[in-house]
Image: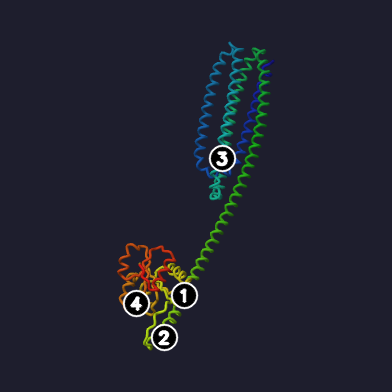
Amino acid sequence: MSINESLLLIAAGVGVAFFAWRSFYTRRSANEQAERTAIEDAARAEAQRKAAEEAARAEAQRKAAEEAARAEAQRKAAEEAARAEAERKAAEEAARAEAERKAAEEAARAEAERKVAEEAARAEAERKAAEEAARAEAERKAAEEAAHAEAERKAAEEAARAEAERKAAEEAARAEAERKAAEEAARAEAERKAAGEAARAEAERKAAEEAARAEAERKAAEEAARAEAERKAAEEAARAEAERKAAREAAQAEADRQAVEKAQRLEDEERLAVDQAIARETERQASEENARRAAERKAAEDARQLAAARTATVAPAKAKTPEETVVMVADDSKVVRVKTGRLLGAQHYQVVMAEDGLDAARQIERALPDVLITDVDMPGMSGLQLTRQLRAHAATAGLPIIMVTSDSEQLRGEAHAAGVNVLLGKPYPEAQLLAHIQSLLSGQSCT
């Protein structure tokens, strides 16, 4: 075989390797473009923070590439020095050079595959992190991030283009070096055609295997990328649907809760308004009825006194019925007044309400009740002060007084000294209060 034929074979092998590399690089560029397009929208929020990191990483990769190139140059220098001995050791050097070249190519291929895998894993991790962060910031920075993302994309494309040009230049230099090495090897091969023929056959076989492997890897990568894209699309659709349902359910739950709270609030307000209206009406009716009955009772009393003055004999007093009995309730608590008034009204007593001791004293000056039920602590005039004032006047000295307090034991002596007939401690049974009223009206002694 002539030297030209050997050179053509070697050039063909180099061409096959070059086209395999171009296919791998094109596929990797396409994959990187697809990944960049997929994460482009999600990476906006993290782009500023990662710009510095990306620049540092690119610088580190550049330095690593330069270090690799320097190591490659040193290796090639060593090979060039070794080729000085090729004339003496033609057969051995050719075999060794071929083995070292194949080992280097295999190592470079393995390194390229490892870097591709690492780059894919890093890109996937960055994409997921970017998607998570971008969801929170996407709405707020949509307008400004679009322009920023476009600028970053163009910068990335420019950087990728520069990197591609740099790699192309490195590849051209490497191809030139390999061409020279091939020429040197061809010269050595020419001296031993048998060894060259074997090397050619092996190169063709490995080139075919490499091309087949590259094609299989390309198809596998395309299939994996398609499956990954379909899976991510399905996950994104499911996530969007879940978020939509969750938002709709949350909104419905919130609306239901607000509706229930509003209905409950309206119901409470209506019930309170009704209770207040009933209390006001009951108190008004009781006051009007008591005033009417008090006027009738006073008129009847005046008539009886007038009749008694005209007669010489005095008849024994007749016990009053509950309808004829006026009971005054003096308490600064409206709730207590209404509650006690309802209890007495249910027993058909005439009930008069007083808001405090002063109010009770003024009403008693106008019309004397049959029984007084008073609280102890009241503003203006306390129950004890009211009792002392009533006992100090002959017209009210005999008025039966029931005092209600929560400190019955402490006030018992002072209350009795003031003239209280009955001291009840809170809370007290309602039947006990009614029994004391009956006892006081019948003239029985009470404690």
- Label at residue 396: 4
**Which residue has dot 3 on it?**
128
Q: CA distance from mark 1 to mark 3?
A: 77 Å
Disc 1 vs disc 3: Cβ atoms closer than 8 Å? no
Three-letter code, disc 1: Ala
Among numbered discs 2 and 4, the one appearing first in the sequence: 2
Disc 2 vs disc 4: Cβ atoms closer than 8 Å? no
Q: Residues within 10 Å of mark 2 (few under 14, many from 20)?
A: few
User: Which mark is in front, 2 or 3?
Assistant: 2
In the picture, which quadrant includes the C terminus? bottom left
In the picture, which quadrant includes the N terminus? top right
Q: Residues within 10 Å of mark 4 (few under 14, many from 20)?
A: some
**Which residue has dot 2 on it?**
303
Residue 367: x and y, percent?
Answer: 39, 79
Among numbered discs 4 and 1, the one appearing first in the sequence: 1
- Residue 115 sits above or below residue 241 on the image: above
Residue 336: x and y, percent?
Answer: 43, 67
**Which residue has dot 1 on it?**
286
Q: CA distance from mark 4 to mark 1?
A: 23 Å
Q: Quadrant of residue 379?
A: bottom left
Q: Residues within 10 Å of mark 3 (few under 14, many from 20)?
A: some
Q: CA distance from mark 2 to mark 3?
A: 102 Å
Among numbered discs 3 and 4, the one appearing first in the sequence: 3
